[in-house]
């Protein structure tokens, strides 16, 4: 049975969104936009009940997203440039997923929305300094993938954090900051690489501090398919 609450649009030109003018969009809660030709997002104002929005492709102006006040999940994936994320400030999103974009802003900082519970940052080279995340006090899940960060950040204020995934974080020198996490259900460290020289042995660095990580209930480290699981009954 077709799910009428979901809509996916492949956009190669304005003609691909022309049908929206005469459509009742009130039932659409999940919208995926696969954009191959830059278009204006002004049509988003016609979606009154959006809960999830995926924007994949290059967009010059994201400001219309700020009008999607019912959004709970926002996923942006683009090889284009984003100078700031001010357009999310009016929103009350719970899940934010950012992937691959470029920016001239340095440092690039994600606005700290009190509503964000789950945050994913993937291959966004401009976000190397993660220290701003120390103020995301309502985070429950954090996913970091292929960031160029050399250190993590102080987790002391993230008392609600339950899940932390670190995937292909090759530039990290060590995992010392993990000791500042108040309490964590699951830590996943995952690295996979082919013919790549790795400066830091992630497993060796983890073993140096694992005795101190009584704050983490379950730790799984997987290197090229070789997985090790550590359970802490104290946490």
Image (cartoon, rainbow, N blue to C red):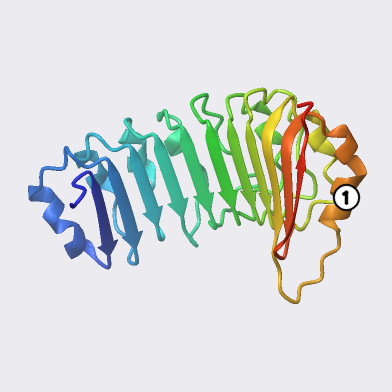
Q: Position of residue 59 (x, y in %)?
A: 39, 56
| Front residue of this view, candidates 221 and 52 | 221
Q: Position of residue 176 (x, y in %)?
A: 85, 39
Q: Is residue 208 left or right of residue 91?
A: right
Kind of element beneath mark 1: helix
| Front residue of this view, candidates 134 and 41 | 134
Q: Quadrant of the C terminus?
A: top right
Tell me if residue 210 can be seen.
yes
231 vs 54: above or below: above
Q: How many residues crowd mark 1 within 10 Å: few (<14), some (14–19), many (20+)?
A: some
Residue in the picture at 41% in, 60% down: 58
Q: Is residue 138 left or right of residue 58?
A: right
Disc 1: which residue: 205
Residue in the picture at 10% in, 47% down: 23
Tell me if residue 60 can be seen.
no
Residue in the picture at 29% in, 58% down: 39
Check the image and name the residue furthest to the bottom. Answer: 195
Q: Is residue 183 left or right of residue 12?
A: right
Q: Position of residue 162 (x, y in %)?
A: 63, 31
Residue in the picture at 82% in, 65% down: 198
Q: Position of residue 22 (x, y in %)?
A: 7, 49
37 vs 5: above or below: below
């Amino acid at each position: 049975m077709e799910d009428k609450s979901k809509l996916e649009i492949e956009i190669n030109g304005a003609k691909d969104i022309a049908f929206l003018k005469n459509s009742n969009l009130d039932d659409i809660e999940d919208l995926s936009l696969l954009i191959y030709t830059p278009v204006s997002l002004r049509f988003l104002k016609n979606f009154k009940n959006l809960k999830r929005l995926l924007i994949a492709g290059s967009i010059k102006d994201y400001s219309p997203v700020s009008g999607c006040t019912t959004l709970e999940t926002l996923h942006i994936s683009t090889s284009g440039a984003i100078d700031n994320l001010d357009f999310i400030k009016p929103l009350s999103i719970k899940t934010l997923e950012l992937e691959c974009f470029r920016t001239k802003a340095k440092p690039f900082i994600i606005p700290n929305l009190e509503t964000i519970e789950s945050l994913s940052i993937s291959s966004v080279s401009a976000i190397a300094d993660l220290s701003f995340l120390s103020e995301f006090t309502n985070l429950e899940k954090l996913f970091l993938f292929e960031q160029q960060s050399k250190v993590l950040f102080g987790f002391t204020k993230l008392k609600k954090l339950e899940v932390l995934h670190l995937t292909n974080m090759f530039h990290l020198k060590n995992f010392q900051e993990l000791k500042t996490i108040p309490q964590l259900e699951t830590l996943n460290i995952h690295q996979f690489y082919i013919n790549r020289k790795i400066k830091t042995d992630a497993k060796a660095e983890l073993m140096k501090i694992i005795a101190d990580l009584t704050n983490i209930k379950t730790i799984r480290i997987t290197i090229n398919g070789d997985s090790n699981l550590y359970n802490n009954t104290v946490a």
